[in-house]
Amino acid sequence: MSFSDEFELLLRARYSLIYIPTREEERVEAAIAECAKRQGNRGVYIWDFVDGYQGNPNDEGFGRRNPLQALELIEKLPATAPAVFILRDFHRFLDDVAVARKLRNLGRLLKSQPKNIVLLSPQLTIPDDLAETLTVIEFPLPDTQEIRVELEKLLAAMGRSLEARVLDEFVRSCQGLSLERIRRVLARAIATHGELRPEDVDLILEEKRQTIRQTQILDFYPTAANISDIGGLDNLKDWLIRRGGAFSERARQYGLPHPRGLLLVGIQGTGKSLTAKAIAHHWHLPLLRLDVGRLFAGLVGESESRTRQMIQLAEALAPCVLWIDEIDKAFAGLDGRGDSGTTSRVFGTFITWLAEKASPVFVVATANNIQALPPEMLRRGRFDEIFFVGLPSQEERKAIFTVHLTRLRPHNLKNYDVDRLAYETPDFSGAEIEQMLVEAMHIGFSQNRDFTTEDVLEAASQTIPLARTAQEQIQALQDWAASGKARMASRQGNLSNRIQQQSLQ
């Protein structure tokens, strides 16, 4: 249901107190005015703290710097006069006992009158005593059609046009920005060289990064990682490559649904985060990184508001990849947290969205400790697949050494005994192999020469891998994967799994 449909339904149903959290004040007021016009041409009254009521000559300036007086005007108008009262930034006054009581009284009175009060606020802040009285409705960011109309209006005013392909790219680039920000960045592009050019997409993307940065919830994560940069994990790579075109229009015509996401479970340093980056790059999709800890805030209701804001922003930027790193740390010990249920509510909102989302947001969640995750997270339907990323086999270690050495010493790769390095480093993860190569480079650099295979082996002898220091935890994780609860990311993993199962029989 669109915002207009939902809002008009609330008007007809006489929901007297409506709360709309949005930063797009001008756009939402225009949308409300359109809805009010369609619903019997209702009068629209707008109030703010500085200027009082505006737009009506009889009440111009009434209630200036007096929120209680602003509410009293609503009672003074004839009971049969249909009207919508928009109160800007009214969340700042809800803690006042007189204002809260007045709102509750009005909520009861207006059930029998064709009047509605709309509270506009850039954030969702509702005191407990008003929670049952207020109805919250979300105002989405502009969709592709609204953005296209805005661009076409601007081009028509300039007497210019863009070819369809370039216009589509502009529309796609603007997704996730408010209409005000879109207008601002387009004005900046026009001020630079007097017209819109294809390269101005870079300006829009920079504005998008700035917007996402300001939310302090999501990060716009640039990535140049390729699928080929991942050593091993052949099953996982095959799965990803097979779905490379699943976000295309051709896939929609074929009847394919959008891929939902992956849960990558495994030992630290085995390439889970690198895989998330490679997916976005390989599929040519923007990568958004969510730090779940940023969702939680001190004020009552703010954590839930941040969660909804994150979902709204991710869906506005779709198609995209949403990377949630170490999700197990965010929701570990869910039942025992003494935070008045905030974590449970955030978790509930999040997993409901995972199960029901229809937008092309591909979620890549990584976890090191599967036992810490609530069982609901593992239920089918939240993710397309759960992959276990274990320690690399000898062949995979060889591939990992080859990837890193090709990057570090592309012209001298033949000088390194990659087979020996892979054989001599059992239980080493991909991250530990990379760090070992860095240590070997320090050895060579300190002696004014290039590093050698022997330097790498010396660095390996001085490194104690996580597989030995956290042996019990890793064994428990491998046993969980071997029981068939996850798909193996590596073909070698499948073989090891069968051997282990045969030895247990």
Image: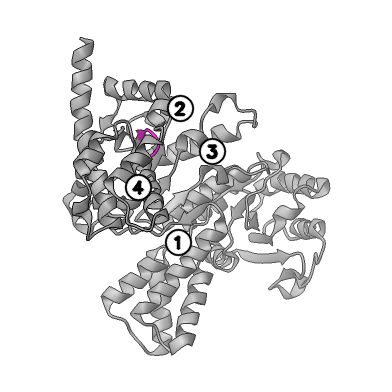
To which residue does mark 3 refer? 346
Q: Do the residues labelled 2 and 4 touch (CB within 8 Å)?
A: no
Q: Dot 1 corresponds to which residue?
A: 176
Mark 3 is on which residue type?
Answer: Val
Q: Which of marks 4 and 1 is in front?
A: 4
Nearest to N terminus: mark 2 or mark 4: 2
Circle 4: residue type: Leu
| Mark 4, residue position | 437
CA–CA distance in space, label 2 to label 1: 31 Å
Q: Is residue 243 magenta?
A: no
Range of magenta residues = 265-269
Check if mark 1's residue and mark 3's residue have beta carbons within 8 Å: no
Q: Where is residue 410 in the image (x, y as percent from the top left)?
A: 24, 59
Q: Which of marks 2 and 1 is in front?
A: 2
Mark 1 vs mark 3, CA separation in Å: 22 Å
Q: Mark 2 points at which residue?
A: 374
Q: Residue at x 32, y 20 (%)?
A: 479
**Residue 450 percent across, percent down from the top left:** 32, 56
Q: Residue at x 58, y 69 (%)?
A: 26
Give 364 or 99, whichever is nearer the viewer: 364
- Type of amino acid under label 2: Pro
Magenta region, main secondary structure: loop
